[in-house]
Image: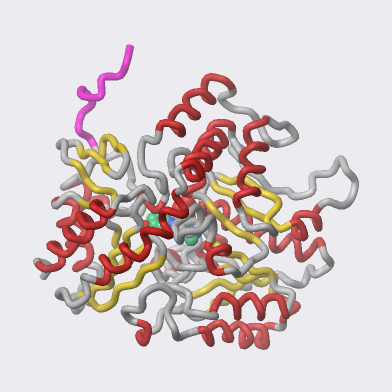
């Protein structure tokens, strides 16, 4: 008998919600029950304009027919098949399509189930690669202050968000951090800020301190999303590439947010014209519909593992669901949707309109800074003295009541709408946010 959900008691206690103020939520739940295109529908029947593509993942918007159909069909044809010592066609097909979409040097794809797993995978590949090429003394990993690389132990170790680290013990050893790239001088810059390329030079200091022969890899988000949209200053990523290359250190771009059109190109590597050695991605890979992530590797990295006896496993790493058939089918349909609808180009075309709309909020009460790039934007608010994050959280609650979904981190409001957004939606999103900010205490 079909489950009648209307009879389920309204009991919210069992689900311990992730990254949520559980007690606050359960007193006053914000429940989404369906979604289509640019909008969510709430349990009380209201339409909410999705200003965040879910959690930066539904780049093609919601309920896209091609993706829904691909999942239905795949579930009825091959529900699951292992990828350890076995194969199925769908994962190979998705890997080839991803390779074709990615910048040239990236020829190989390792599948995971999330951004966090992609990060762990990339860090492990970096360490094992250095060992494979006779550089086994390179065991250190360098991250960056305010970096977000998911929530697993490797990711929080190289990450630089205090609350994601301080409760969880001593983390990985042998990790150091670059300074973040957020300078007060750059407030209200549109797109890449002018100042701060020199912040990459700090890597020379770290290299001098530890010795280059001890460092395996540097991992950064080309544009830091989760920490409140921190943009790379002009010349910064280029400098990081130069220094890592000079010292035999791998460079990993964590593109879990910047991948799949967010900046108007397939990946940020292409957008900035700076090629790392490994790229992590997730989220937009399947339009957020089925959990899936991936690590893209250059031929040089991949081929370093392809030695020794042929019957031996080359990389002792993988997940039960790496490249699972349904996720792979969702991925193929997603990449096709992006391509057929020209969504990456669309993001690039809309970016100037988005930029002007966002910056029109300058001068509203408590606004300290506005930042944007591609279809990403952030509005930073002055915190309430002694009560950090409260002001932005009230803005989030009020925005939801007024029919728009935004994200907040600390006192920063972040937005990353689906790439199918229309100018009228941008007007609605920014217009509503403006009303919210005008009334904010
Ligand atoms: N790396 C980066 C750069 C990310 O942004 C992850 C890794 C981890 O991905 P998973 O799939 O394990 O969550 C992320 C995730 C937000 C927000 O609103 C950002 C993320 C996730 C949820 C919310 O800032 N980023």
| Residue drawn at 9 percent across, 66 percent down | 439
Q: Magenta stretch: give its range.
A: 1-11
| Residue drawn at 46 percent across, 63 percent down | 168
Q: Position of 253 compared to 30: left or right?
A: right
- Residue 230: give x, y in percent of width and height: 41, 72
Can residue 193 be seen? yes
Q: Is residue 7 magenta?
A: yes
Total numbered labels:
0
Front residue of this view, candidates 243 and 359: 359
Q: What secondary structure is the magenta-colored segment mainly?
A: loop
- Residue 122: give x, y in percent of width and height: 63, 58
- Residue 36: give x, y in percent of width and height: 30, 37
Question: In the rendered view of the protein, which quadrant contains the N terminus?
Answer: top left
Task: Decide: is 362 above or below 103.
Answer: below
| Residue drawn at 16 percent across, 47 percent down | 28
Can residue 291 be seen? no
Q: Position of 288 compared to 217: left or right?
A: left
Residue reaching furthest to the top: 1
Q: Position of 65 compared to 234: left or right?
A: left
Q: Quadrant of ligand 1?
A: bottom left
Quadrant of the rendered structure where residue 165 is?
bottom left
- Residue 263: give x, y in percent of width and height: 45, 61
What colouring does the structure picture have? secondary structure
Question: In the rendered view of the protein, which quadrant contains the C terminus?
Answer: bottom left
| Residue drawn at 64 percent across, 60 percent down | 278
Quadrant of the rendered structure where residue 383 is?
bottom left
Q: Position of 219 compared to 20: left or right?
A: right
Q: Is residue 253 magenta?
A: no
């Amino acid at each position: 008998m079909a489950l009648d959900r209307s009879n389920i008691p309204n009991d919210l206690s069992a689900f311990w919600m992730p990254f949520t103020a559980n007690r606050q939520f359960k007193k006053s739940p914000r429940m989404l029950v369906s979604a289509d295109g640019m909008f969510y529908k709430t349990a009380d029947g209201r339409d909410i304009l999705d200003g965040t593509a879910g959690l930066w993942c539904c780049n093609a918007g919601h309920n896209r027919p091609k993706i829904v159909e691909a999942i239905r069909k795949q579930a009825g044809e091959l529900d699951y098949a292992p990828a350890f010592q076995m194969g199925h066609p769908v994962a190979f097909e998705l890997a080839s399509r991803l390779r074709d979409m990615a910048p040239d040097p990236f020829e190989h794809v390792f599948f995971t189930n999330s951004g966090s797993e992609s990060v762990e995978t990339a860090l492990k590949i970096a360490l094992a690669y250095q060992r494979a090429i006779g550089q086994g003394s390179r065991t250190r990993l360098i991250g960056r202050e305010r970096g977000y690389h998911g929530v697993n132990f490797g990711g929080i170790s190289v990450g630089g968000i205090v609350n994601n680290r301080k409760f969880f013990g001593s983390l990985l050893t042998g990790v150091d951090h670059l300074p973040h790239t957020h300078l007060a001088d750059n407030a209200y810059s549109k797109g890449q800020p002018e100042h701060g390329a020199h912040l990459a030079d700090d890597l020379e200091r770290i290299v001098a301190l530890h010795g280059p022969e001890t460092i395996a890899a540097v991992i950064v988000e080309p544009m830091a999303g989760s920490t409140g949209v921190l943009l790379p200053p002009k010349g910064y990523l280029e400098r990081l590439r130069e220094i890592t290359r000079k010292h035999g250190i791998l460079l990993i771009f964590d593109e879990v947010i910047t991948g799949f059109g967010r900046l108007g190109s397939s990946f940020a590597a292409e957008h900035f014209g700076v090629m790392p050695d490994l790229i992590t991605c997730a989220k937009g890979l399947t339009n957020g519909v089925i959990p899936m992530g991936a690590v893209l590797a250059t031929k040089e990295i991949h081929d370093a593992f392809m030695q020794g006896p042929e019957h031996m496993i080359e990389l002792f790493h993988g997940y039960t669901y790496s490249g699972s058939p349904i996720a792979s089918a969702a991925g193929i349909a997603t990449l096709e949707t992006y391509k057929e609808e020209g969504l990456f180009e669309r993001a690039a075309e809309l970016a100037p309109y988005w930029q002007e709309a966002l910056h029109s909020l300058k001068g509203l009460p408590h606004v300290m800074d506005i930042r944007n790039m591609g279809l990403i934007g952030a509005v930073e608010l002055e915190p309430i003295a002694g009560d950090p994050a409260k002001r932005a959280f009230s803005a989030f609650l009020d925005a939801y009541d007024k029919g728009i979904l935004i994200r907040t981190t600390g006192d920063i409001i972040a937005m990353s709408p689906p790439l199918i957004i229309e100018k009228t939606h941008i007007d609605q999103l920014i217009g509503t946010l403006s009303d919210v900010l005008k009334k904010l205490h």
